[in-house]
Every structure is written in C-alpha cells, then in structure tokens.
Amino acid sequence: MKNNLHVFLGATVADAAARPLHWVYNQKKLNSYIKGKKDFTFLKKNKSPFYNIKTGKVSGYNEIGQVMFQTLLENYEDIEKEFKKNILKNFGPGSKYWKNLNLRSKYKKVKDWRGMIKGPWIHQNIIETVNNIKSNKKISGGVKVNESDGFCAALPYFLYGYDFKSLEKIIRIVTASKISLKYALAKFYIIDLALKGAKDPVHEFIKRFKKNTSFKVIVNDIKKIKRLNSKFHPIIIKKLGMACSYPGTFNSSIYTIINSRNYKEAILKKEARDRARKYQTGKMCLSIWFPTEILKDYKQAANDREISLPWLVRKLLRDYFEGKIDLKV
C-alpha cells in the first residue's frame, strides 16, 4: 500500500467534519448555525435541509471513494470490473442509498424543498452509473451533471500509484462528462505535485500547464483567483461559483487552499463560506496539508462527542496509533 493514505484520510475527516452543514444554501441560516462558534466541525445536530445522517458519517462523495478503497483492499486483478460490482452493492437496489431514490425524486418536483430525507442522499452521477452498469453499457459514468463524484471515486486509486492514463478510466466509471474529467485531472496533478514536494503546487501547476490547451481555462481561472486573495471569503465565493458543479467547486477550493495556512483553517473556512456548500473535492485537495495532529483531534472528537466514525478512519487511526503506518506529509 502506498504511503499517501493521509490524503484520503484527510478528505474523509474533512467530509465528516463538515457533513452536518452540507448544502445549507441559505446564507442567513448558515450564519445562525455557526454564530458564536469558533469550531463548527462535527455539529451534533444535522443542519442539512436535504438529508439527515448521524454526525461522523460521510456524504455520498466520500462514500464512493471508500467503495473504491475497499475494492483495492480486496486485491482483485480486474479493479474496474470489481469496482462496478461494489458500486451496485453499495449504491444499487437494496442499498440504503437506493432506498431513498424515490424520496429524492419527490424533492425534484417542488420549488421550496422542505423537510429532509432520513438517511443518505444518492447523487445524480451515481444514479446514472448504477443504471448504466445494470444495463451493461460500455460507458457507465453519468453525463447529466458536471460534479466531483468521479474524482472522489478515483482518489484512492490514484494514491495507490496508478498512472494518469488508467486513472481516466476509473473517473469515467462514475462520470463521463468531459468537463468533470478535465477538472478531476487538474486536481490530481495538483495533489501529485504536492506529494512530490512542490512548495506551492498550485503555482507549479500554472507553470507546468500554462501552454496546455486542455487546461487553458483552468489555468486562467487560477490566475484570477490568485489576484483575489485579500477579499472577504463569502463575497469571493459568489464570484467563483457556489453550486455543486464545476468550475465553481474547483475554483472555490483553489481559493481556500491559497488563502489558508493549514488544513484545519481551510476546513473551517470552507464550512463557513458560500451557502455552506461543502465541497468534498476541495477538502481532498486540502488534505495535502494533513498533519498528524488532526488524527489526534479526530480521535478525541470521536470520544468526546460519541460520533460514528467511517470504517476507513477507524482502520487508519488504529494502524497509525499502533505504529503500522506513517501518515506524515
């Protein structure tokens, strides 16, 4: 197993920490939820207006990554084939996600979303992927939205050391959108630069890909973002985009990386910003900073607040504190 698991652990912790504020799009409500709190990670009471799961559990974004991680641990020769099987098992008919599909569909029919689904929320890309796998379609990834599920799914695969060519195949299992693929690869290149020791991986990405036509728009956007680093965070996010989709989710993540001194500050900033859009993608990029101290913080949070930790975090925490793995950046 590659020694880059701190990246995925960082992403998992960040996802769980911010999950109770997931998709709070009303800025006034968000402000009221975090008012007077220096630390609003792992809120005991769910504030997401869309779905409600126990504090400490992760969103569907991180869940698809955990499904890939489990697939890798099983040591199959044909990872793509087994990953698809595990997607069906964890998200398809009979799963806790699929059971909420009808309730999710009802939400689409009303303008003012009220109440919340009890249990996890299944994403559009995952719905399409499950249906396409069941229909034995050659291309299984979703195409209706440009969101980050493909990146989330491929992150553990990337950390195992697979090359960028094979990485594209994994991303396409979950999302076949050209836009989603492009932004996912950009994030992987930035993480790759960080893992290889670049002091400023975002700047290094600009230097390396400034003449690359595929990343032209992304490079130009990052340059604009770097010029905005002294502005008030929520205002900037409105300019960069607040929805789930690219490019907003990528640009706001880059802004947070540039303007935060460390992992925890970045997570808090992300939670408090633009309508509380919890961008797992950004948190995964932010996890390049992942210090060992946060491991202790998360373990303490689990003990103090009686939260339910994802199985991955339990495994990595146990292995880390027993000295079996080294999670230093």
Image (cartoon, rainbow, N blue to C red):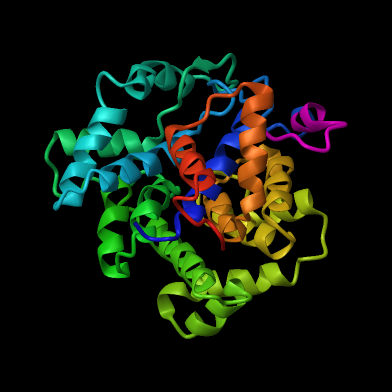
Residue 40, quarter of the rendered image: top right
Q: Residue at x 64, y 26 (%)?
A: 303
- Outermost residue on the right side: it is 36
Counting labels gives: 0
Seen in the picture, residue 328 relative to 71 is either above or below; the reply is below
Q: Does the stretch in magenta take in 40?
A: yes
Res. 65 image quadrant: top left
Residue drawn at the location 43% of the way across and 59% of the way down: 184
Front-lying residue, 288 or 113: 288
| Image coords of residue 79 (percent x, y) | 20, 50
Task: Please provide the residue range marked out in magenta.
Answer: 30-41
| The stretch drawn in magenta includes residue 323 | no
| Left or right: residue 50 compared with residue 28 | left
Looking at the image, can residue 33 be seen? yes
Residue 179, how many percent across, how many down?
41, 59
Q: Can residue 23 be seen in this view?
A: no
Residue displayed at 16% across by 33% down: 134
Q: Where's the N terminus, which quadrant?
A: bottom left
Decide which of 120, 240 is in the foreground and name it.
Answer: 120
